[in-house]
């Protein structure tokens, strides 16, 4: 009887044992969870702060690395560029609803690059309360929720209090084992610190290094996977280093976890990237630079190691950044190719010949340019123009906005006073706005008052004009600006184009005829000023 009971018990336990074995096998095989991401880039200006230049590029690079090595399906990564706040919340709600219905482990990643403060994000320049976003990141609809904010004053996101400039730069007080369920909040700055972007990287320091780490540069364990702790540690180390070198204040990325479990969370698997480069570093430090643009892709700290990184197909430079023994080697990688690049293959070189970030030859339109230029047009003073100012500000890397107030006077037998304003947009064919070769269009209006004995009474004239511009703006002596070009204007006036006044000798010629007049004029653009 007892034997029969034992047999029955064993038979009852068989289905449970099989299910348990299948679960163990599934975990051992590392079956990937369902992964979705909402990625946001916001360049728009906020009151009191200028427009950003590279937040959209930051977002695109994060999306690219998630698709290449993060095991995210294309339909599961949603890219939003300067969206309305409601669009972000709707996207998060829809993705969480998808994950709520998905079987097994799930992961939600939210990334934002743009303006922010301790209380709000500013997509499209409109405030979005951090509390509304955090409420969704802390939702239990997904197994793990990861929120990354690359913006100023990140302490409002992670609740970090900020660090002093003399604090230990590489200390990371997080558990060695990142748990497998819960939420993680990462910010590119702490407390009230500013986050920095740079034209040399065409993006922010933190996102650049985070993406580099996810491509494999942060794989300290050498297992071909980049974990959450590895990626954050790598990005924090190089962000602090770069802001110490290039910014006025240090920037300390911050980290807040609310997790349970034992296993480290693998964010990317390098082997899934298709195009793999094995870097064998003998001494270092090494840097991989995109040959076509000179933009840094990733960096490795000094020391002996070998690791795999996932790159996009193309031409690259591997540079050893050692002042005592600099060296460089160019290599090319094709789609779905695995390539070994050994530091021993590097050729000795001087840093002057190495294309690296911030080291460029002089050019009339340098890559690193201040976002605003203020100029005067002094040569027009000879044509009775009292002043002509020009203010140009970058909207992004290719577009700029130009505002040109002007005024003129002429004292003689007739007295003339006039004011005008032109507003236009420019597209920069070379260089980066507002510096470089450009073409543009503008509209404007002028108001003039003419009075004197010959007229018998005061006269007021209003004219409108549309115009086209072409030229280029260069920097010299660090911050001085010089702009040269041509302009074409079509003007419409109540009598005649006011510009005609400056090329006739008699008022009778100017006021001959009645009714609306129009005219086409061609002129030059000469401006000198300061970039800031």
Image: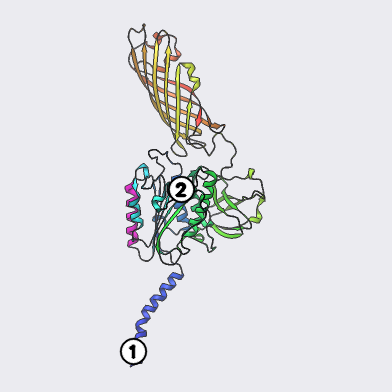
**Quick one: label 1 or label 2, which is nearer the N terminus?**
1
Nearest the viewer among 466 and 408 is 408
Q: Nearer the viewer, residue 487 or 379?
A: 379
| Magenta stretch: includes residue 442 | no
Q: Report the disc number at residue 329.
A: none
Q: CA distance from mark 1 to mark 2?
A: 65 Å
Tell me, yes or no, whether the highlighted magenta stretch contains residue 87. Answer: yes
Callout 1: SS: helix
Q: Are marks 1 and 2 in contact (CB under 8 Å)?
A: no
First to last magenta residue range: 85-100
In the picture shown, does residue 170 fall above or below 518? below
Q: Left or right of 350: which side holds 384?
A: left
State the residue at coordinates (36%, 81%).
13
Position of 50 relative to 12 (above/below): above
Q: How many labels sit on residues? A: 2
Rendered-image quadrant of the N terminus: bottom left
Q: Residue 58 shows which numbered tag? A: 2
Label 1 crowd bin: few (<14), some (14–19), many (20+), radius 10 Å: few
Find residue 451 and report its image quarter.
top left
Residue 48 lies in quadrant = top left
Left or right placement of residue 255 versus residue 131 in this view? right
Q: Position of residue 95 (x, y in %)?
A: 35, 56
Q: In this view of the protein, can residue 281 be seen by the observer?
A: yes
Residue at 45% across, 34% down: 393
Residue 370 placed where, x, y %?
50, 36
Classified by dominant secondary structure, the portion drawn in magenta counts as: helix
Q: Which mark is residue 5?
A: 1
- Image location of residue 70, percent across then percent down: 46, 58
SS type, badge 2:
helix
Q: Position of residue 214 (x, y in %)?
A: 49, 56
Residue at position x 34%, y 55% from top?
Answer: 136
Q: Residues within 10 Å of mark 2 (few under 14, many from 20)?
A: many
């Amino acid at each position: 009887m007892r034997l029969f009971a034992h047999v029955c018990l064993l038979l009852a336990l068989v289905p449970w044992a099989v299910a348990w074995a299948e679960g163990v096998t599934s975990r051992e095989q590392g079956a990937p969870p369902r992964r979705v991401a909402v990625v946001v880039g916001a360049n728009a200006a906020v009151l009191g702060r200028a427009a950003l230049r590279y937040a959209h590029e930051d977002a695109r690079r994060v999306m690219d690395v998630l698709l290449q090595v993060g095991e995210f399906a294309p339909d599961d990564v949603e890219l939003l560029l300067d969206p309305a706040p409601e669009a972000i919340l709707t996207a998060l709600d829809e993705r969480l609803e998808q994950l709520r219905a998905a079987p097994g482990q799930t992961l939600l990643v939210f990334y934002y690059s743009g303006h922010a403060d301790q209380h709000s994000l500013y997509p499209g320049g409109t405030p979005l309360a951090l509390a509304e976003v955090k409420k969704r990141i802390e939702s239990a609809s997904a197994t793990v929720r990861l929120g990354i904010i690359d913006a100023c004053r990140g302490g409002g996101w992670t609740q970090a209090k900020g660090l002093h400039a003399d604090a230990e730069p590489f200390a990371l007080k997080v558990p060695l084992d990142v748990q497998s369920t819960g939420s993680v909040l990462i910010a590119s700055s702490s407390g009230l610190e500013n986050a920095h972007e740079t034209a040399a990287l065409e993006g922010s320091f933190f996102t650049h290094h985070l993406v580099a780490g996810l491509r494999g540069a942060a794989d300290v364990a050498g297992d071909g996977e980049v974990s959450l702790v590895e990626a954050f540690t790598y990005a924090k180390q190089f962000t602090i280093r770069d802001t110490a070198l290039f910014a006025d204040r240090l920037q300390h990325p911050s980290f807040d976890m609310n997790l349970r479990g034992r296993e480290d969370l693998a964010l990317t698997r390098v082997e899934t990237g298709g195009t793999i480069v094995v870097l064998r570093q003998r001494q270092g430090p090494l840097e991989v630079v995109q040959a076509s643009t000179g933009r840094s892709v990733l960096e490795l700290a000094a020391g002996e190691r070998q690791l795999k990184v996932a790159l996009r197909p193309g031409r690259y430079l591997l540079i050893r950044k050692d002042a005592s023994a600099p060296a460089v080697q160019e290599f090319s990688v094709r789609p779905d190719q695995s390539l070994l690049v050994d530091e021993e293959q590097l050729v000795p070189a001087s840093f002057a010949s190495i294309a690296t970030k911030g080291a460029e030859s002089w050019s009339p339109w340098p890559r690193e340019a201040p976002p605003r230029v203020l100029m005067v047009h002094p040569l027009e003073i000879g044509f009775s123009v009292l002043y002509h100012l020009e203010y140009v500000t970058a909207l992004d890397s290719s577009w700029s906005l130009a505002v040109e107030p002007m005024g003129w006077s002429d004292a003689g037998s007739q007295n003339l006073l006039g004011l005008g304003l032109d507003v236009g947009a420019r597209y920069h064919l070379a260089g980066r706005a507002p510096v470089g070769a450009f073409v543009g269009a503008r509209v404007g209006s002028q108001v003039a008052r003419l009075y004197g004995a010959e007229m018998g009474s005061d006269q007021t004239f209003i004219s409108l004009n549309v115009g086209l511009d072409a030229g280029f703006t260069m920097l010299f002596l660090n911050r001085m600006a010089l702009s040269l070009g041509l302009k074409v204007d079509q003007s419409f006036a109540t009598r005649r184009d006011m510009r005609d006044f400056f090329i006739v000798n008699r008022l009778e010629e100017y006021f001959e005829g009645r009714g609306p007049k129009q005219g086409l004029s061609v002129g030059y653009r000469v401006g000198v000023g300061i970039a800031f």
